[in-house]
Image (tube, rainbow, N blue to C red):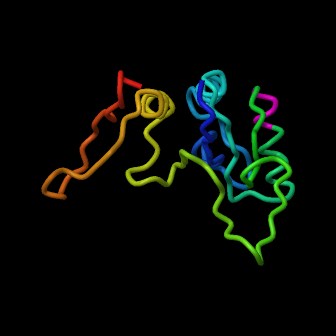
């Protein structure tokens, strides 16, 4: 089990981007999110949406079996004061369709997270290479 937090975007990531409407769910989005929760990850909805549009997105996710640890905050009930703190939320992993190279798809996202795949620049700094993260003592 893990206690890592994943911040996940809504439009273009969980659903097709039709903002302010709600697009069709991305292939395997809800199945993958449910599996990540079953694996022990805590999910935070991290989206541009606010007000009624945000409420609709949260309700859509709830109807599809996803309850969030936080919604546009680091955790439910967070007392955020923008005069005292940055808006960047606390998360170990961010999933967004506007990543470098775009959104790879939920199957690939799950593999990247669970197999601990990281990306780094090729030794000449010209091309990104995908490699599996090395594990510590006794493979942990």
Tell whether position 38 is magenta: no
User: In x, y percent, where is residue 98?
Assistant: 49, 54
Q: Nearer the viewer, residue 12 or 93?
A: 93
Write the residue at 43% across / 28% down. Answer: 111
Quadrant location of the N terminus in the rendered image: top right
Quadrant location of the C terminus in the rendered image: top left
Which residues lie in the magenta part? 60-64
Write the residue at 70% across / 46% down. Answer: 45
Would you identify the image quadrant in which residue 69 lies?
A: top right
Taking 42 as reference, is 100 left or right?
left
**Main SS, magenta residues:** helix
User: In x, y percent, where is residue 50?
Assistant: 79, 59
Write the residue at 81% across / 70% down. Answer: 81
Tell whether position 61 is magenta: yes
Q: Nearer the viewer, residue 69 or 126?
A: 69
Would you identify the image quadrant in which residue 39 lies?
A: top right
Query: Considering only vertical position in the picture, is 127 above or below 106?
Result: below
Write the residue at 64% across / 53% down. Answer: 90
Return the residue found at the far bottom: 83
Would you identify the image quadrant in which residue 116 lies?
A: top left
């Amino acid at each position: 089990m893990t206690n890592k937090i994943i911040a996940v975007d809504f439009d273009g990531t969980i659903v097709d981007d039709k903002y302010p409407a709600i697009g069709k769910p991305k292939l395997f989005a809800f199945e993958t999110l449910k599996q990540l929760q079953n694996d022990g990850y805590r999910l935070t909805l991290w989206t541009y949406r606010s007000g009624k549009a945000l409420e609709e997105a949260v309700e859509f996710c709830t109807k599809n079996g996803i309850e969030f640890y936080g919604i546009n905050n680091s955790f439910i009930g967070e007392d955020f004061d923008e005069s005292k703190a940055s808006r960047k939320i606390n998360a170990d992993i961010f999933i967004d369709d506007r990543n470098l190279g775009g959104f790879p798809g939920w199957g690939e996202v799950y593999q990247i997270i669970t197999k601990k795949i990281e990306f780094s620049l090729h030794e000449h700094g010209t091309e990104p290479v995908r490699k599996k993260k090395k594990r510590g003592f006794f493979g942990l």
